[in-house]
Image (cartoon, rainbow, N blue to C red):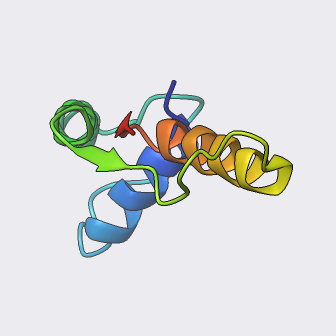
Amino acid sequence: MTNIDTIRAEFERTNARDHRREPPKGSNYIDPMAQADWESFQKGWEASRKSLCVKNPFELIIGDPDGQWAHEVAEKSLRAQGFKVVG
């Protein structure tokens, strides 16, 4: 599952020039246009991540506990960012 704070931080960073938007109150923006922008951005962000498949940079080698640990950490990190992981 993706961290909503990560998505919101990217939204805020990429839409910083939009002065009509106030910070969110709870999970929604006060301005209906800003809320619509946020919902659209969120859907697009999630769709873009679903279409990306990345290879785990750490090869899983049987009998190598450090390599196994690195492989698992990398996979969890990539999945937390919304990527599909292969290999």
In the rendered image, the residue lying farthest to the top is 1
Q: Does 66 sit left or right of 87 as displayed?
A: right
Q: Does 85 sit left or right of 46 as displayed?
A: right
Q: Residue 72 in the image: x percent, y percent?
A: 67, 40
The front one of 37 and 76 is 76
Q: Residue 53 in the image: x percent, y percent?
A: 25, 42
In the image, residue 55 sits, relative to residue 39, either above or below, namely: below
- Quarter of the image for the C terminus: give it: top left
Q: Residue 16 in the image: x percent, y percent?
A: 32, 72
Q: Does 7 sit left or right of 76 as displayed?
A: left
The front one of 22 and 52 is 52
The front one of 15 and 25 is 15
In the rendered image, the residue lying farthest to the front is 63
In the image, residue 32 sits, relative to residue 64, either above or below, namely: above
Q: Residue at x 26, y 65 (%)?
A: 15
Q: Residue at x 49, y 36 (%)?
A: 79
